[in-house]
Image (cartoon, rainbow, N blue to C red):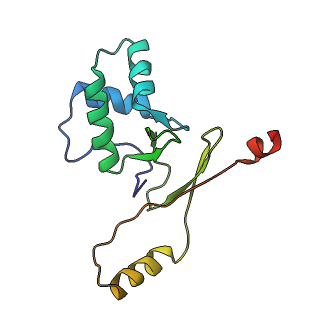
Amino acid sequence: MTTGKSTPQSPARQRKTRQLEAVLSAVRGMTDFQSAAEIFTKLQLNGTRVGLATVYRNLAALAEDGVLDTVKSADGTTLYRECESSEHHHHLVCRSCGKTEEFHLKGLEETLNEMGREMGFSALSHTVELTGLCSKCSAKK
């Protein structure tokens, strides 16, 4: 859930492999967050032969490189999606259906860095993930 790129590219630190390209292809255009197991199943259904461990490893590398966003589901599973924004951003996640929206809070970065400096910290990083019910799920309840 940190800095993201608007269009997935092969990460600079990763060697370009057939498996990496397959994972990139599987996540391109995804609008909903999906687990590594779901992405693995998608690859298998498309006839791509790749191991589950390889999918996990490539997803983690793509997320670290800012190509993919990640959020944690209610059960703690890491979910992945192509980044929509090239700037640092945060997520609002529906606890019921998993719908996720990216948002920016003006001044948040500066406030957090100032707070860190006041407390003697530097090189801060953070993630913000707000959870609630989207309008559709709220209407159902």
Q: Quadrant of residue 45?
A: top left
At a point 33% along the width and 71% down the height, the residue shown is 124
Give left or right: position of 27 versus 63. right
Residue 137 at x, y = what percent? 74, 41
Q: Quadrant of residue 43?
A: top left
Residue 27 at x, y = what percent? 43, 33
At a point 29% along the width and 84% down the height, the residue shown is 120
Give left or right: position of 4 versus 54. right
At a point 65% along the width and 40% down the height, the residue shown is 96
Residue located farthest toward the bottom when viewing the structure as drawn: 118
Residue 74 at x, y = what percent? 53, 42
Quadrant for the C terminus in the image: top right
Give left or right: position of 11 versus 141. left
Give left or right: position of 117 versus 6. left
Residue located farthest toward the front when viewing the structure as drawn: 75
At a point 29% along the width and 14% down the height, the residue shown is 49
Q: Quadrant of residue 18?
A: top left
Residue 48 at x, y = what percent? 33, 15
Disc tally is 0
